[in-house]
Image (cartoon, grey):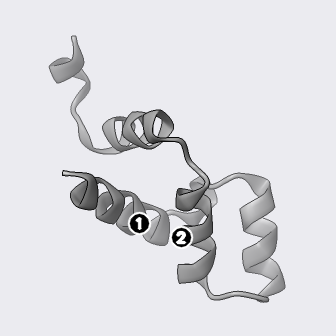
Amino acid sequence: KAQNLLEGLFSYYMEHPEMMPEEYLTMLEQGSDSKEIVVCDYISGMTDQYAIYKFEEFYVPKAWNA
């Protein structure tokens, strides 16, 4: 389950990098690291609870949480 969550977040942020905080967008603009590395850095800094929250926000229909 954890692997699917991480893969989902990685895919989402690879397609929507603008959803990451400004700090990571700056890293992308500077080009010092690849997009994959920047996305991994962002995800690796998340707490477990925040990663679950973001995954649910992106992938779980709102009606299922009600």
Residue 4 horizontal/vertical position (percent): 22, 59
Q: In the depicted view, which residue is nearer to us: 17 or 41?
A: 41
Whole-number angstrom distance, CA of label 1 to CA of label 2: 7 Å
Residue 15 horizontal/vertical position (percent): 44, 69
Label 1 with label 2: CB-CB less than 8 Å:
yes
Residue 26 horizontal/vertical position (percent): 81, 69
Q: Secondary structure at mark 2?
A: helix
Residue at position x 27%, y 44% in the image: 59
What's under tag 2, amino acid-wise?
Cys
First reached walking from the N terminus: tag 1 or tag 2: 1
Label 2: few (<14), some (14–19) or many (≥20) C-alpha neighbours in 10 Å: some
How many tags in the picture? 2
Residue at position x 21%, y 10% in the image: 66
Q: Quadrant of residue 61?
A: top left
Q: Secondary structure at mark 1?
A: helix
Q: Is 18 left, or right, of 43 in this rendering?
A: right
Residue 42 horizontal/vertical position (percent): 61, 60
Q: Which residue is mark 1?
A: 10
Q: Which residue is mark 2?
A: 40
Q: Nearer the viewer, mark 1 or mark 2?
A: 2
